[in-house]
Image: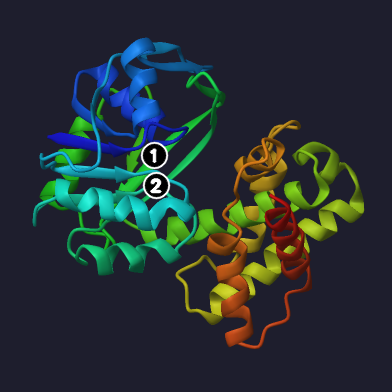
Amino acid sequence: MKFLIVGAGAVGGYFGARLLEKGEDVTFLVRAKRKEQLDRDGLVIESVNGNTIVQPKTVMAGEDETFDVILIGTKAYHLDQAIEEVKPFTNEKSVIIPMLNGMAHLRQLQNAFSKEQVIGGLCFIESTVTTEGVIKQTSKAHIFMFGELNGEYTERIQKIEKAFLDTNAMVKVSNSILEDMWHKYLFITTMSGVTTLFHKPVGPIRELPEGEEVVKGLIKEIADVMRAEEAPIASHVEEIQFKRFQEQGYKMKSSMQRDMEKGAAVEVDHLQGYLLKKARLHQIETPILKSIYVNLKLYEQAL
């Protein structure tokens, strides 16, 4: 199978490199500056799970080639542009796999391509790209999950699964990918929300009883909104996600917090903002979520 990875960043770049390391046919859609870095230095991964340097194939917007599987790991605020750049590289059988956080992008991708082409996907990975273009991955988790939105184990899913088999990453097919994506959305919105609000990693926040109360309160607010939306979440999702928060490493930071520390853009409208719109629609009060949103929008305005 021919894979196209949109960008060579912290998420797509990492999993694309693991595929390429195995020997699969992988190409990266990049801009001129990143292409220059990759041509000069290769795609460099520094990871607790094993370092690697691979020399990737690249294409740039406007070139003419089609691919079987396209992985979109851009930030949400770059999705519109990514879609337009990807369209010429697709045919009617191309499979589109999003690696973004949140849920709003699913409909956007289905409208841009087709419902049949888009499947579900999510990642659990703590990684960042340095100014030199090195992808640094700093915790054991490097999980990529994908699956048909209806849960079927189709032929195309089996082919993609086979391609990822034996890569140096934890790649899983899910027969409940929509539930997995909603659960991830709840977790990442909580994690990014409290770490950016308090400007601290997980450990110091949960050391304070009041910090734990804020986390529990935020999880409940988000779960209430998701249930009003009839999202397929577990009946005890609050307990699941709080336990997961407790299990994170003491120094664990959200990717949004790392972006703020670098003075970069954040996905506030895609994550917290989307949920706030749904909360207003269902007339649900979400004071903690609202405070986090205000904090992030004030940061955004100061950029």
- Which residue is at 35% across, 53% downward? 81
Question: Dot 2, how many residues are within 10 Å of its Cα: few (below 14), some (14-19), or many (20+)?
Answer: many
Q: Please tell me whether residue 256 is drawn above or below residue 185 in the rendered image.
A: above
Tag 2 secondary structure: loop
Residue located beneath label 1 in the image = 144
CB atoms of marks 1 and 2 within 8 Å = yes
Q: Residues within 10 Å of mark 1 (few under 14, many from 20)?
A: some
Sequence-first tag of 1 and 2: 2
Q: Amino acid at mark 2?
A: Met
In this picture, is 131 found above or below 215? Answer: above
Query: Residue 84 versus residue 163: which sits nearer the camera?
Result: 84
Q: Is residue 253 left or right of residue 227?
A: right
Nearer the observer, 42 or 116: 42
The colour scheme applied to this rendered structure is rainbow
Coordinates of residue 14 in the picture (x, y in percent): 41, 28
Q: Which element is circle 1 on?
A: strand
- Image coords of residue 208 (percent x, y): 91, 47
- Could you tell me if residue 174 is visible in this image? no
Which residue is under mark 2?
99
Query: Disc 1 residue type?
Result: Phe
Cα–Cα gap, marks 1 and 2? 8 Å
Please tell me whether mark 1 or mark 2 is closer to you in this view: 2
Quarter residue 167 falls in: top left
Q: In the drawing, what numbered circle is on residue 67? A: none
The spot of residue 22 in percent (x, y) is 25, 18
Q: Which picture quadrant has residue 52?
A: top left
Q: Which is nearer the eye, 157 or 67?
A: 67
Q: Residue at x 84, y 59 (%)?
A: 213
- Image quadrant holding the N terminus, namely top left
What residue is rendered at 78% in x and 53% in y? Answer: 197
Q: Residue at x 80, y 37 (%)?
A: 203
Residue 9 point in image, percent of width and height: 43, 33
